[in-house]
Amino acid sequence: MNTESYVREFEEIFIQYFPKVRTFAAILLKSEQEAEDVAQDIFVKLWEQPDLWEGDLVRNYLYTMVKNHVFNRIKRKKIESRYIQSQINLQSLEEMTEFKDPLNEIYHEELQLLLKLSLEQMPEKRRQVFEMSRFQHLSNHEIAERMNLSVRTVEQHLYLVLKDLKKLLTIAIFLIKF
Amino acid sequence: MENYFNKIIELFVKSDVSASSQNEFYRWLTGDKFSREKDRVLRDLWDNMAENKPAEVSSETQQSLHDVHKKIRQRHRKVNTKLLRFWQISAACLLIALLSALYLTDKTTPAAADLIELYAPTAEMRHLTLPDGSEVQMNSTATLLYPAQFTGKSRSVYLIGEANFKVARDAEKPFIVKSSDFQVTALGTEFNIKAYPGDSTLSATLLSGSVEVKFNHLSSALILEPNEQLTYNRFTKTESLDRPDISDVTAWQRGELVFKSTTLEEIIAVLERKYPFSFVYALSTLKEDKYTFRFKENTSLPEVMDIIVSVSGSIQYRIEDDTCYITSL
């Protein structure tokens, strides 16, 4: 391959895949700058490996590369393994969601994370009410006083949270169960 | 239970998460447990992401491509020293190829690629318009070989010595200048190449547009940006990328003489091309000291030598007929 067609072929692959690699890195790293760095590093390496430049091969290779690069960056961030207030035991999790399953034990970590992430999706007030109720074990009365809400509203908030969580878990489980 | 994994990654990807959730997610994602399941979800995510269509190139992607080319070039500058021996072998091969190409065109295939040779004699310059409208200004003692018609997929010419090229735009047919140690590929652009056989350094300087310099070795191609000069030293076997004063690079075209920290030996090599005199000297009389000079156009040789002699303080000269004798003081 002469230089000219070498450059042209590289640029074609670059244009086709660079945005995808970059976006994939960005949604996991949640940083545009880091994603750009990762994607550029990957393509600098790819330049020297023209034997990998064909369709399926390059797709697989780029996936492996971007995953490894992202994981390496994540590991370098030194994630502290602190236990946070949202940790709740399995039993109360099952109680809350009225969902009991022998597999829950195995997937305890996944359930915890799922709960934490979905709580963050909820409206601020609703999430606060829920955390006071389930993590700080306050009564509905106490919560109503602190939040300056009526007891009825507190109950309503809790009902909506549990409904959401139940729905989330059921959807996540549904396909495996039946 | 892949749905848990799916759901977790989906929630993380689609929403803003708190720093603590992000940490927890990362710990979970990179943890060894269930790594195959997590990989499957990530791969699905990857597979379902759209690829870019060739026609839709955003300016961000263009910028990234530009950055990546730059990084590749910097990387190669580090790697290249290992390839230098290969360079020299390839340079020799290219010369042989060039000579045999000449021989063949001469003897057997006159119709296919009739090469025309243009030589700029000592003390003279030559200006030439190539068949495609590109313009070439040749410095003294430079030789250019070019075809009567550019018939192939590219426009190739061979250069020994120094010349400046203003390339007529033709995106379909790249313009390629081949010289002893490297070749320069351009589309529509202006650049200067200096590759005299006797000189210790060769250089390519881009004035405008964009060119690619290939060192007769596949994996070491560099893309120059305007005002960048690539210099290769045949003796120290090093190369460097500089941003010289462009008016110095093009000075010869205006008849000016510019030397930037140059040894007397190198200066004399240039004077030998520029003036119709033979130089006689013993190498031992020339020290390794480096000098910087700038002479206006039409400066005569005695004027140039007067200044060099007085600055150096260690040599003298005399001119007899068309010979310039340099001796130590």
Image (spheres, helix red, strand yellow):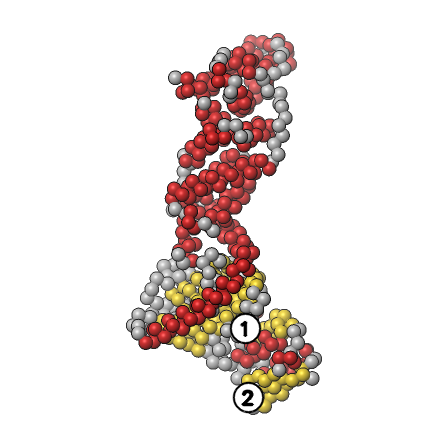
> Could you tell me residue B63's position as x and y percent?
49, 49
Q: In this image, B327 relative to B60: left or right?
A: right
Extreme left residue here? B111
| Residue B199, numbered circle | 1
Percent position of residue B91, x then y: 47, 67
Q: Amino acid at mark 1?
A: Asp
| Callout 1: SS | loop
Of pointers 1 and 2, the one earlier in the residue sequence? 1
Residue at horizontal 30%, vertical 70%? B112
Query: SS class of the residue under badge 2?
Result: loop
Residue receiving disc 2: B322
- Residue at horizontal 45%, vertical 39%? A63
Amino acid type indicated by mark 2: Asp
Judged left or right of residue B127, residue A112 is right
Residue at 42% over, 61% down: B187
Q: Residue at x 58, y 66 (%)?
A: B236
